[in-house]
Amino acid sequence: MLWPYKTPGIPDDLFERFPGIPLSKREVRLLLISALRLKQDSVVWDIGAGTGTIPVEVGLLCPKSQIIAVERDEDVVNLIRRNCDRFGVQNVKILAGQAPECLNQLEPLPDRICLEGGRPIKEILTEVWQRLKPEGRLVATASNLENLYLISEGLAALQARNIEVVQGGVNRLETKGLYQTLAAVDPIFILSGEKF
């Protein structure tokens, strides 16, 4: 078994990857999962699932939950499937589709949404919010100031409650030649809000 633990935080190098396909770094995943405030039987939509790290982590953490991972590229969908298989995760359904157009195909409706990308981000945010169940939570990531502004403006316009914005800045110890140095993991903003 690749990850025999009950805690999240799978090392990045245990996931199969494609060059150029985003992977949420381990420390960022921990913040995202914490912000989702999962229940054992949550229905989670991961929009822009990339490598599939969030569906894998959530699937292992909450095996009674239902996770739907959405990614637009068929090769990346297959990558997510392989990563789920690597870790023995069986509660993830993967859909090849472009958000927001594909959202009508997703069932059941979510009580948790992880929005990890897509364009136009504000339109996708609005569309997924309409499908989010009352008392549900949405967590979104922004790696640039433009998306930070669009997502936070979108959450305010949707009258999300308990909005939180966290900037994650993590350094990892790396060996470079004879020396060990601290290297920064790309900083990211994590925004969350609740629907009432």
Image (cartoon, rainbow, N blue to C red):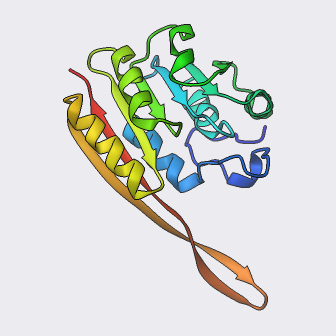
Question: Measured along the vertical axis of the image, is residue 66 above or below residue 192?
Answer: above
The residue at the point 19 percent across, 29 percent down is 159
Q: In what quadrant of the picture does the N terminus appear?
A: top right
Residue sitting at x 64%, y 33%: 56
* Residue 75 location, quadrant: top right
Between 72 and 166, the one lying in front of the other is 72
| Image quadrant in which you'd find residue 98 | top right
At a point 35% along the width and 23% down the height, the residue shown is 129
Choose between 101 and 66: the one closer to the eye: 101
Does the image show residue 99?
yes
Residue 3 at x, y percent in the picture = 71, 42
Vertical side of 121 occupied by 143: above or below: below
Q: Quadrant of the C terminus?
A: top left
Viewer-proximal residue, 149 or 179? 149
Above or below 147: residue 56: above
Q: Is residue 149 left or right of residue 143?
A: left
Residue 120 placement, left or right of 26: left
Q: Position of residue 33 (x, y in %)?
A: 46, 40
